[in-house]
Image (cartoon, rainbow, N blue to C red):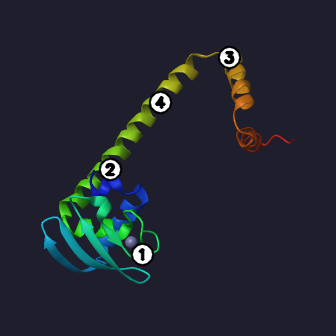
Amino acid sequence: MSIITSASGLSCWRGLDYYKSKKIKNIKKINNNEYTSIVLGNKDYNVYLNLEHPRKSTCNCPLANGKRIICKHIVATYFSVVPSSAKNFEEEQEKLQQEYEEYYEREYNNAMKCLNKMSKKELIEELVYIFDYAPEWVYDNFIKRNGIEG
Ligand SMILES: [Zn+2]
C-alpha cells in the first residue's frame, strides 16, 4: 500500500493541485519515512506523513482529523517529499485516459460496423428495443432532437 493507493482519486487530484500551487510549507524530515508539514488550505493544517505505514499519516483538517483517511493535504505533502510520485501519478492518469479513449474508439468503430450492415427494418427494431430499456430521457431527447411534437 502506498499513499496514492490508500487515498481516493479526488484526494489525489486535489493533492496534486495543492502541490503544483506550492501550498506545502515547513516540510520537516523526521527520518527517511516520516515527515511533517504545514499545508495552506482554508486554515493551515498540520500534516504528519508516514511513507512506510500510509494509514498512520495524520492531518488535522475536518476530513481526516482523528480518522485513518489520506486527505489531499497528506497527498500534497507526499508529492512534495517525493516529487517523482507526482510525475508518476500524472503519467499514470494520462495513460488511463488514453486507454479509455482507445477503448471508446474501438467500441464506436465496432458499433458502426454493425449498424452499417443492418437494414432499415433491423435498425428500427433495434431502436425500439433500446427505447424500451433505456431511461426515459433517451427517448425524450430523441423526440426533441428530431422535432417531433408529442
Ligand atoms: Zn487534511
Query: Considering only order in the chain, which callout, 1 or 2, is on the residue closer to the N terminus?
Result: 1
Q: CB under 8 Å between callouts 4 and 1?
A: no
Give the number of the disc on residue 122: 3
Q: Residue at x 19, y 64 (%)?
A: 82
User: Residue type at mark 3?
Assistant: Glu
Q: CA distance from mark 3 to mark 4?
A: 20 Å
Q: Tell me the residue that label 1 is attached to.
A: 61
Q: Is residue 42 left or right of residue 73?
A: right
Q: Which residue is mark 2?
A: 94
Q: Residue at x 31, y 65 (%)?
A: 75
Give the mark nearest the N terminus, 3 or 2: 2
Amino acid type at mark 2: Glu
Q: Secondary structure at mark 4?
A: helix
The answer to whether residue 70 is above or below residue 150 is below
- The x and y percentages for residue 98 are 35, 43
- Ligand 1 within 8 Å, label 1 CB: yes
Residue drawn where x is 36% and y is 60% of the image: 12
Which tag is nearer the camera, tag 1 or tag 3? 1
**Measured Cα–Cα span from mark 2 to mark 4:** 20 Å
The mark lying in front, picked from 3 and 4, is 4
From the top left corner, tell me how far across and down residue 99 is, in percent: 36, 39
Q: Which residue is mark 4?
A: 107
Judging depth in this view, the residue of 66 and 86 nearest the camera is 66
Q: Quadrant of the C terminus?
A: top right
Which of pointers 1 and 3 lies earlier in the amino acid sequence?
A: 1
Marks 2/1 in contact by CB < 8 Å: the verdict is no
SS at mark 3 in the image: helix
Closest to the observer, 10 or 92: 10
